[in-house]
Image (cartoon, helix red, strand yellow):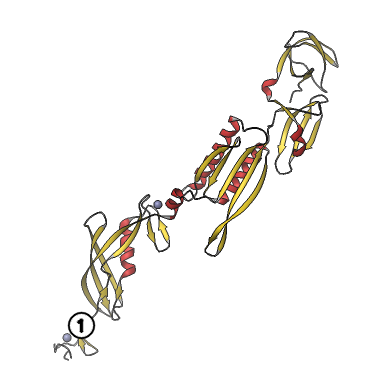
Amino acid sequence: MFCVECGKETEDIREGLCGDCYMADADIKIPSSLDIEVCTTCGAVKDGHRWIERPDMETVMLQRIDGSLEPTYKVDRYSFAAAFREEDRRNIHVELDVELETRDLKKSVIKESRIILKNGQCRVCSRVHGHYYEAIIQVRPTLRELTEEQMTTVKEMVNREVKVKRGDERSIFITSTEEKHGGIDFYMSDNGVSKKLAKRIAETFGGETTTSGKLAGMEDGKSIYKMTYSVRVPAYERGDFVVISDTIFQVREIRTSSGHVTLTNLETGEPVTVDRKDMEEAEILGDESIVQESVLVSEDEKEVKVLDPDDYKTRTLVKPPGYVTEGDTVSVLKHMDKMLILPRT
Ligand SMILES: [Zn+2]
Ligand SMILES: [Zn+2]
């Protein structure tokens, strides 16, 4: 048989052509240049609508090339090997050795292209630089200002949670913090994390949370809200001594969910549960540091005689129910003209 194109005599004929003539117009096309957008800040590269962090550039370039190759109609399969040569920081010369296959025939072609690295800014970096935030966690004192200890606890809680949640997810970060009105504001990149944190802060301090949202615009046809989670930290903590209507109480438990506060009436030794609102009238005396030790002079079943730790005068105090003295001092709490024995817990 003869090839109708070149006249070669061969038995290997398809559609009247020899192998070489059949493959003559089998080819593959590649654009003369391919752009890859690289984030100038973190080095992430853009892949369609996505950004790939810490990319393996070789893989990215190979995928980019593969996605842009256009074989002609005769090619059934192809494979290629690529050689990259950096011309300068932005331009990479590409030489491709492509093997085209059709039926049982093969043909090799050499192609050239260029990869151009373009400056870009990934979504996360543009958010970090653009003061992006989805929510504000507002931590506020009920009175004057948060104590240094409360401030530290809150900061640690927020930093720890963001660090944990962030992991590989760089989109979770604290945009900024502002100390104001005796409290602190955290501008947060992530709403879900903020919501959880606000709840946890409230639980830690027995505070109250209010939520508000502000329409901040539209994105992909959806309304975008910026949320504010405001946590009001009460002025008292567990263990604090407070005065309500001339009676001294110690705070035992603060329940955030129900808004109830359990107190011990130090004058009767009885527990009482009040509403968070009732606590707004409480005068806060302080924590365990205001407890004083007074020297025990004598005791009977119902009373003890002790020395007032301030003026060393003898005073008679009623024992709380079930109270047993231990050692030669008694823990007492003084407020105004009152002096009470502190029950053991
Ligand atoms: Zn031929
Ligand atoms: Zn970036």
Question: In which quarter of the view is residue 9 placed?
Answer: bottom left
Q: Nearer the viewer, residue 207 or 80?
A: 207
Give the residue at mark 1: 19
Question: In which quarter of the view is residue 104 placed?
Answer: bottom left
Q: Residue at x 39, y 61 (%)?
A: 47
- Residue 333 vertical position relative to residue 307 in the rendered view, above or below: below
Q: Count numbered badges in the picture.
A: 1
Q: Position of residue 345 (x, y in %)?
A: 73, 26
Quarter of the image where ligand 1 sits: bottom left
Compared across the picture, whether 176 is left or right of 111 comes to: right
Q: Position of residue 301 (x, y in %)?
A: 85, 15
Identity of the amino acid at label 1? Gly
Residue 244 visible = yes
Question: In which quarter of the view is residue 155 placed?
Answer: top right
Does the beta carbon of the residue at mark 1 sit less than 8 Å from ligand 1?
yes
Residue 168 visible = no
Q: Residue at x 30, y 65 (%)?
A: 34
